[in-house]
Image (tube, rainbow, N blue to C red):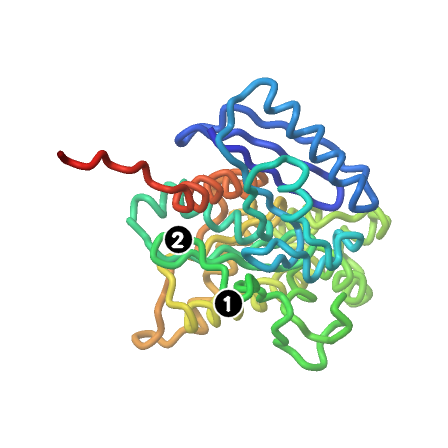
Amino acid sequence: MWLGIAIGPTFLKVGVVEGQRLVYREVFPLEARDLGGLLAEADAAYRRVLDQWPVRGLGVALQAVVSYPDGVVRHAPQLAFLQGAPVKFHLERQWSRPVVVASEAQMAAYGEYRLHPEVQRGRSRHLVYLSVEGGLSGGIVVDGRPYWGAHGWAGLIGHIPVQPDGPPCPCGRRGCLEAFVSPQGMLQRLQSVLWRHPQSRLRQIRLANLRVEDVLEAARFGDPAAQEVIEEAAQALGLGVHMVASWLDPDVIVIGGSILGSNDFFVEMVAQRARAYMLAEASPVPLVLPSHLKYLASVWGAALAAETVLTAASPSPRRKAKR
């Protein structure tokens, strides 16, 4: 059995994986606002699991850019108090065992690779996962194994500029891909276009109460303001999918995230826009799919990555010498 832990700005998700079964899962609210508090809350969840399940190892997915294999947080707008923290070092010292630490998107990519039915049916070996959560990030699987890159930064797609004079991005620049497709970016764009659409039913909802789910639902039923924002996001992410396909030539691109990655309507829009960018015969056309594992993708991936990495690192039992 292998333990996966996923940590975001407001949650700590835990799952125990045995083979292709998730035998235990639980989601805890995250109250920590400093490294010490996070370590304490992670330890409480870890001890709770160990009281019930004999886990062989564990992986931790963070909603941050994390260098691999040293597990140092390099960029964490959603978990700012972890900036620069050697999380892997602290967890291994706390638990006295090896821990695989990587970004949420990298872990989720491996989970989708191992368990997505369409990936398994097509015997795909190369996959890219695009995570649309608080921002936009990616994870990569090459020839069946997680690809971390030279420094663990592989898949950092969100801050590729697609429109130099576009909307502001949390990174301080303008026109990044994330500014168009993150839930926060989409809501900000909606506020800027609502004035052009006096008939939009979204004008009846207080802006502070609007959710991306409301925008997606309104777009499905023809609301002009919602359609403008969703179309813009689908075009931008479709361009991102096209760039990823051209650079990496994957078999499959999975779009994940608790909101957009669970919305087949949006994912199909992205797939159509991506195909429109591709040259009919010269460009690779990967399968573009919604997430199969949904909000637990990074938990699954963390557990399965731990199994893969830690099993490979374990010394093989010595064979007895022949006499």
Which quadrant of the figure has residue 280? bottom left
SS for dot 2: strand
Residue drawn at the location 73% of the way across and 75% of the way down: 174
Using the image as rendered, state which of residue 12 and residue 215 is in the foreground. Answer: 12
Task: Measuring from the top left, give residue 204's x and y in whole percent.
Answer: 83, 49
Q: Is there any visible trace of residue 150 in the rendered image?
A: yes
Using the image as rendered, state which of residue 89 and residue 175 is in the foreground. Answer: 89
Q: Report if the CB atoms under discs 1 and 2 are less than 8 Å apart.
A: no
* As drawn, 72 above or below 9: below
> The residue under label 2 is which amino acid type?
Arg
Q: Which residue is mark 2?
A: 145
**Mark 1, mark 2: which one is toward the viewer?**
1
Task: Measuring from the top left, give residue 147's x and y in whole percent.
Answer: 45, 59
Residue drawn at the location 68% of the way across and 62% of the way down: 74
Disc assigned to residue 291: none
State which quarter of the image contains the C terminus: top left
Q: Which residue is mark 1?
A: 150
Position of residue 154 in the picture relative to residue 314 (left or right): right
SS for dot 1: loop
Residue drawn at the location 76% of the way across and 37% of the way down: 30
Task: Measuring from the top left, give residue 86's x and y in whole percent.
Answer: 68, 53
> The residue under label 1 is which amino acid type?
Ala
Position of residue 227 in the picture relative to residue 277 (left or right): right
Q: Is there any visible trace of residue 287 in the rendered image?
A: no
